Amino acid sequence: MKAKILEYLKNDHHHWWTVGLLPGIYSLLYLYQNNFTLVNSWEQFIAFLIYFIVAPCTALVLLDFIFRKKIHIDRKHLYYCFLINNLAVILSLFVFMRWRWKALILVFIITIATSKYLSKFYKIGVLLLSIMIIPAALQLGNYYYQSIYNVQEWSQPQSFEKLNFTKKPNIYLIQPDGYVGKPTMTGPLYKNKNHEFYDTLEALNFKFNHYYRSNYPSTLSSNSTLFNTQHHYFNHGKAKNELYNARDKIMGTNSVLRTFKNNGYETNAILQSNYLLYNRPEVFYDYINIEMEDVSFFPIFHNDIDYSYDFKKRLNNNQSTAPQFYFIEILSPSHISHSKKFSLGIEKETEIYLEKIPDINTEINKLINFIISNDKNGIIIIAADHGGFAGFEYTTSAYHKTTNRIELKKSIFNSLLAIKASDEFTPYRKRITSSINLFPELFSYLSDQSQPTITRDASSYIFIKGPKNDGVYQYFNTDGENVTVKKQNHIQ
């Protein structure tokens, strides 16, 4: 092996795959190890192969031909420049998810300027890259085995999917991201009375479940349980950055959408962002306001979609006589800063969060007034996906270590729930304590069942990733009591 390496370094042979193929392989390993849940569709994989392996290799072969036949410049200059720039371009896209033009132009200029002096060493760079591929491949393999291959399927068909609805009103689920419930909003961390908003909704016959909780602390983890009505326990503690296939569980076939469709409903998703479509899931909704061809292969976040316009257009243009289910996702008020790097401190982060409340209140009011003016008998559900995390310096700090402070726990899980429905729905509404039993209670009401056939664990869970207390912890039990209990992985 040593002799072959020395021979490779000394000879004047230049192999296209060393600078055309290896940078793409290493970069793909890096991308999938760190962002697997964002790019795990076959469409994305094929696109990345074309963009970052086939295209660079083709370009190098053509350039190499031109250099050998037309320019007659030492080929090591080409291979040196191509290796550096190819790796810079690919990593720029994979790390920053966008073109870093100024940096890339600077790299290009530097490689050209240094080619005369450093090109003779490019093969050392090839060897280093080859060595780096080995641990990258092993790390990705370990991650895939532990967090993907070795993960149990947690979502199963539910008994309520066979229910026959005797009532089929249109259902509107409005989800403001991170809108905390009233006890927390008016409590010591937020100190916001928010009277006008609550009074306005009550005047429109909305009823609140003020102690409603999400079962999980993030949009993906919470909505996975909301739409599948089952616990995933963060893949029983095997999740790394995100819950595996969460977007497929939310936007694809799930227990809730199957139940609606089994009862003749058309299903509609109106989204303000492309966040739930990052990995290009197979969408099970009959209508969605984002075309998949408009979704980038890269997980680039866009939140500038005019969901209000799209919803009104869909409602006005929908000529179907079938009952409708609408899922309307609004990315506000959201939560405090995600990471320590961008945090402005506990007080300032809370202030910024609260500054967004009046605007989202106005948006929600306009939305529900439009719905009521067009559909007086529809059931309108306003259900946030989780809390706003005020009281923490940044959201991910909540996952670093456990806390026993109930106000901090409520800041994570206590969520807005307000429902406009007939008085007959009241006993069902009162039993909705967390997101896992929202739809089972709704389906029981629509099918005239006295109560759901299965009693579900309404507990709230968080995944702590600290060095000393790593694991899935129960923060509220099914009765809403404050606990801090580590959940054993064998419990299903």
Image (spheres, rainbow, N blue to C red):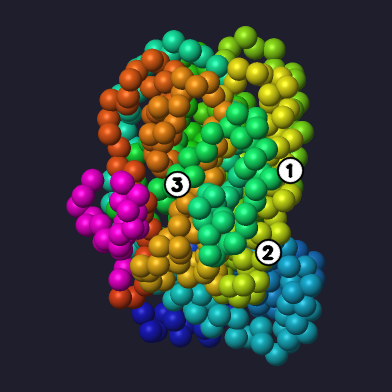
Q: Amino acid at mark 2?
A: Ile
Label for residue 352? 2
Residue sitting at 50 percent across and 22 percent down?
423
Tell me the residue that label 3 is attached to: 211
Residue farthest left in this picture: 490
Q: Secondary structure at mark 1?
A: helix
Q: Quadrant of residue 245?
A: top left
Residue 491 shown in magenta: yes
The CA distance from mark 1 to mark 3 is: 23 Å
Q: Residues within 10 Å of mark 2 (few under 14, many from 20)?
A: some
Q: Could one spot residue 287 in this view of the protein?
A: yes
Identify which residue is drawn at 36% across, 80% down.
Answer: 1
Please give the residue where the numbered disc 1 appears in the rendered image: 362
State the CA–CA distance, disc 3 to disc 2.
24 Å
| SS at badge 2 | helix
| 396 over 176 or under it: above or below | below
